[in-house]
Image: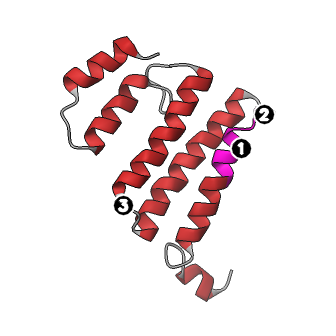
Amino acid sequence: MSDHDSADIGGRNAAPANEAQRDRAVGRMYDDGQDAETRLRWAELAIAASRRRGVTSGIDAARTLADEVNVRAYAIREFGVVPGDTIRDAADLCETVFRGIGRRTTRSARSCRHGWR
């Protein structure tokens, strides 16, 4: 890595790299030829890359939130709800959505805990 390359980390080339990483991770998360544990690791990577992309490229918070919600909802639908899990906790997913849109979460999260299908 040259000095120029290292100076650009998080700069103009970071957004396309994060976008590519997110796309690759989402694709591999969907690959049912891989075991569940591997696919869940890809889901974590997709979420992290999406968040980094939001920071480095100035993509609005709503799009970053939508990316995370889509990945987490897919993981819950595909692998089931796991309370306390960083990806598959349905109540936490609901709270994340409501926080992201500026709503109070107490009653909404409680209803999510009991009504996720």
For residue 109, above or below residue 29: above
The tag on residue 28 is: 1
Region of the chain picked out in magenta, as a range: 24-33
The tag on residue 60 is: 3
In the image, what residue occupies the spot 56% across and 24% down?
A: 77
Q: Which residue is mark 2?
A: 34
Q: Amino acid at mark 2?
A: Gln
Judging from the image, the colouring scheme is secondary structure
- Front-most of 109 and 41? 109
Indicate which disc, 2 or 1, sits on the residue closer to the N terminus: 1
In the image, what residue occupies the spot 42% across and 24% down?
A: 90
Q: Nearer the viewer, mark 3 or mark 2?
A: 3
Q: Is residue 83 left or right of residue 3?
A: left
Indicate which disc, 3 or 2, sits on the residue closer to the N terminus: 2
- Kindly indicate whether the residue at mark 1 contacts the one at mark 2 (C-beta within 8 angstroms): yes
Q: Position of residue 13 (x, y in %)?
A: 57, 76
In the image, what residue occupies the spot 36% across and 60% down?
A: 60
